[in-house]
Structure formats: C-alpha cells, structure tokens
C-alpha cells in the first residue's frame, strides 16, 4: 500500500492505517531528539528492535495505531496510538508529530480525531495520557482537544536531563469538544438516510 488508507477525515488531517513502507520514517521520527525529549526517553531505539516489533504491533487489536495524514497532499505528518485496556474499556493515548511538521497546529486536530474514534467507534469510556510538565505546547494541544488535568506524577520524567513532573490528563465522551466526524458522516449499516 503506497497511498494512505484513510479511515477518518477531519478539516485538514485524516487518520489512516499505518503503512509498512513508512516504517523507516516512523523510526526516524521516534528517534528525533525532540521526540526523545518530549517522551522523557534517554536512549534511541535500534532499527532492528523497531522492525521486529512491527508485526506484533499490527496484529495486536489492543494497540491500534493511526497514521496522521495531511489532506492537502496526502503526506504522513505523524502517528497516534491508543493502548487499550479491554478489561475497563479505557486507553492510554500517545501522539507523535513528525519533526518537520511540528508547530503547525496538527497536534490538536490529530488528538481530536483519535478521541472521536475512541469514543464513537471503539466505545471507550475514558482516554488518558501523560505529558511532561515543561511541554507547554503539548499540554495546550491536549486541552484544546478535550483533555482535562487529572493529576501529576512528581519527578517521574526527564526534561533536558533533569527530573520533572509528568502531568496526567484524561478525557471522557462528555468532554469531547466536537463536532464528531464519526457521528456526522457515518450511517449505520441498513439505516435509511434522513429525508
């Protein structure tokens, strides 16, 4: 598959299926110093580890990933992930915007589209995330997409080599800022259009 397989279309972005041929780009984005800083990681991931994990991730229905695609030109500009806990119908949310695409306002729309999927298609009760406190741009994007502050883990992350707090944020369907792309465009199978 060389063209994006679009699942959900927003204003300027869409969510699509991750593509094997994009794996080298995903790996480069994940190992960019800005990404490592934002996630609080200290070490890059080797290509062998990333490549070997691809099939496991793709076949794990509790770990849906979405490629974030810019509608204007079909370019992949990021990834989102839901790490679903089926026992309680919640998920951890993770966002990655490609380094050259940061600062363009994509994080809020990509997050909102993923929440739309989570609440209206996956029927999740709650989605949560962790973000390092100094990551002000990330916090703002998540707030605009509907996440609320839920707590903090003191000294749990690293920013520029120093321990910092990780903020916990969560969203429930009632927090979804809408409008929903799913509910406005998807007709249940067998449903008759409104006349």
Image (spheres, rainbow, N blue to C red):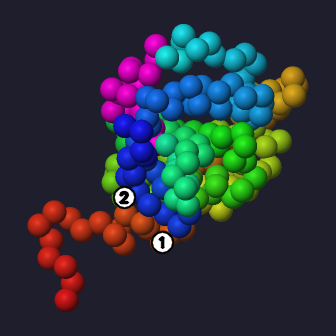
Q: Percent position (x, y) of residue 151?
A: 68, 44
Q: How many marks?
A: 2
Q: Residues within 10 Å of mark 1 (few under 14, many from 20)?
A: few
Question: Considering only vertical position in the picture, is 188 above or below 93?
Answer: below
Give percent across and percent down for residue 29.
Answer: 65, 32
The answer to whether residue 128 of the structure is visible from this angle is no
- Mark 2 / mark 1, whichever is N-terminal: 2
Q: Would residue 116 be found to the left or right of residue 46 on screen?
A: left
Placement of 62 over or under 161, stated as above or below: below
Query: Callout 2: helix, strand or loop?
Result: helix
Residue at the image position 33 percent from the left and 26 percent from the top: 59
Q: Find residue 147 and report its image quarter.
A: bottom right
Q: Is residue 194 left or right of residue 88?
A: left
Q: Is residue 185 above or below residue 160?
A: below
- Name the residue rendered at 80%, 49% in the picture: 136
> Observer-nearest residue: 73 or 175?
73
Taking the spot 39% from the left edge, 20% from the top edge, the residue there is 56
Q: Is 173 a magenta residue?
A: no
- Residue 63 visible, this orientation: yes
From the top left corner, tell me how far across and down residue 19 is, in percent: 43, 34
Q: Is residue 65 magenta?
A: yes
Going 57% across and 31% down the picture, which residue do you hit? 26
Res 20 label: none
Mark 2 lies on residue: 120
The residue carrying mark 1 is 179
Task: In the rendered view, tell whether residue 160 sits above or below residue 15.
Answer: above
Residue stretch in magenta: 52-66
Image position of 166 (left or right of 25): right
Residue 24 x, y percent position in the rendering: 56, 25
Q: Are marks 2 and 1 in contact (CB under 8 Å)?
A: no
SS assignment at label 1: loop
């Amino acid at each position: 598959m060389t063209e994006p397989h679009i699942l959900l279309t927003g204003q300027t972005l869409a969510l699509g299926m991750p593509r094997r041929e994009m794996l080298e780009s995903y790996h480069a984005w994940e190992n960019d110093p800005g990404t490592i800083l934002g996630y609080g990681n200290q070490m890059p991931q080797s290509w062998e580890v990333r490549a070997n994990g691809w099939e496991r991730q793709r076949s794990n229905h509790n770990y849906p990933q979405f490629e974030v695609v810019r509608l204007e030109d079909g370019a992949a500009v990021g990834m989102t992930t839901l790490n679903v806990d089926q026992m309680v119908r919640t998920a951890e949310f993770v966002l990655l915007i490609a380094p050259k695409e940061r600062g363009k306002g994509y994080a809020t729309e990509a997050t909102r589209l993923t929440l739309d999927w989570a609440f209206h298609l996956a029927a999740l009760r709650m989605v949560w995330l962790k973000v390092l406190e100094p990551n002000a741009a990330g916090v703002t994007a998540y707030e605009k997409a509907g996440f609320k502050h839920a707590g903090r883990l003191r000294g749990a992350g690293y920013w520029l080599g120093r321990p910092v707090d990780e903020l916990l944020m969560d969203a429930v369907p009632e927090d979804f800022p809408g409008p929903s792309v799913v509910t406005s465009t998807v007709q249940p199978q067998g449903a008759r259009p409104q006349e």
